């Protein structure tokens, strides 16, 4: 039975990806630093194991991977989904805030991938990194978040270039606006309406829709796909730049 590690698995896209993988017969190591939420999300799920880990801390990542191998014996896919969404204007983003975003969104992808690579070489497995449409197109308030996700996109290409020799694939999913708790918290009704007007499909995506893209890239159906960025965004990346509702914060 194939095994996947999914970070940020307590909620949102990470939990939806966990559910989709389990439905396809995978075993899943569910990783998150929010212990109560993770334990609740993992409860009652056969073939899933919850492991508390902050992916920005090297020692915790090493311990987590060792626990996964002890429990399951192999890793066939790594889904780097853990992220923090902190949005602020450039001149209001102090270095501590910048580092908080980078530590999880970028350092976490690097550290977790580095720790899992030896095991993916053995299975000729796959890495799927979750970036964001904010890593493909600049937008107000996204100086740290967008930059971290743009770096994840390039890191994915680096992984594909280096790991292809061992048959390990690396791809990236860049979701557009998705109906997650984070989006509901930071997107006002005016911003949601502006997104609906700009996105060709005229709606936010669903967590399950992003998860299905991730599962495809983990599967043998994507056996000749590597180094790619799939914008699961309803066509948002294809249409123009910026949103007036976001630019209004500049005054």
Image: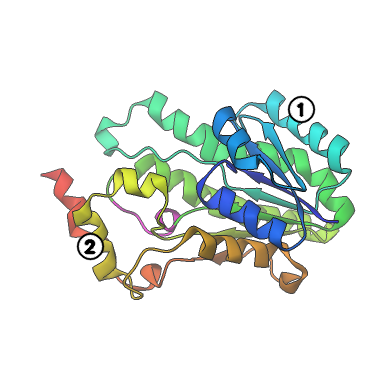
Decide if residue 146 is on the left or right side of residue 73: left
* Rendered location of residue 250, percent (x, y): 15, 44
Please say if 129 is above or below 218. above
When asked about the image quadrant of residue 56, the answer is top right
- The magenta segment: 133-139
* Rendered location of residue 58, percent (x, y): 68, 27
Q: Which mark is residue 29?
A: none
Decide if residue 116 is on the left or right side of residue 153: right
Decide if residue 215 is on the left or right side of residue 91: right
- Per the image, the residue denoted by label 2 is 194
* Rendered location of residue 242, percent (x, y): 26, 60
Q: Residues within 10 Å of mark 1 (few under 14, many from 20)?
A: few
Q: Which residue is found at the position 55% from the left and 40% from the top? A: 106
Mark sitting earlier along the chain (1/2): 1
When asked about the image quadrant of residue 89, the answer is top left
Tell me the element at label 2: helix
Residue 170, visible in the rendered structure: no
- Per the image, the residue denoted by label 1 is 63
Q: Which residue is found at the position 49% from the left and 35% from the top? A: 102
The answer to which of 209 and 100 lies nearer the viewer is 209
Outermost residue, left side: 251
In reply to whether residue 61 is colored magenta, the answer given is: no
């Amino acid at each position: 039975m194939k095994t996947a590690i999914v970070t940020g698995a307590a909620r949102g896209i990470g939990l939806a990806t966990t559910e989709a993988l389990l439905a396809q017969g995978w075993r899943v190591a569910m990783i998150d630093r929010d212990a109560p939420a993770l334990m609740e999300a993992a409860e009652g799920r056969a073939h899933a194991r919850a492991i508390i880990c902050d992916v920005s801390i090297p020692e915790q990542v090493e311990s987590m991977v060792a626990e996964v191998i002890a429990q399951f014996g192999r890793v066939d896919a790594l889904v780097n989904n853990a992220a923090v969404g902190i949005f602020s204007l450039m001149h209001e983003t102090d270095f501590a805030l910048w580092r908080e975003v980078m530590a999880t969104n970028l350092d976490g992808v690097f550290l977790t991938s580095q720790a899992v690579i030896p095991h993916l070489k053995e299975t000729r497995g796959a890495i799927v990194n979750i970036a964001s449409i904010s890593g493909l197109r600049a937008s107000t308030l996204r100086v740290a978040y967008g930059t971290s996700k743009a770096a994840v996109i390039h890191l994915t290409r680096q992984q594909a270039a280096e790991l292809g020799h061992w048959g390990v694939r690396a791809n990236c999913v860049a979701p557009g606006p998705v109906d997650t708790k984070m989006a509901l918290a930071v997107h006002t009704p005016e911003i949601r309406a502006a997104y609906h007007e700009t996105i060709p499909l005229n709606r936010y995506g669903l967590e399950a829709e992003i998860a299905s893209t991730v599962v495809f890239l983990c599967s043998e159906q994507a056996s000749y796909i590597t180094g790619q960025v799939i914008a699961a965004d309803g066509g948002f990346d294809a249409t123009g730049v910026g949103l007036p509702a976001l630019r209004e914060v500049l005054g």
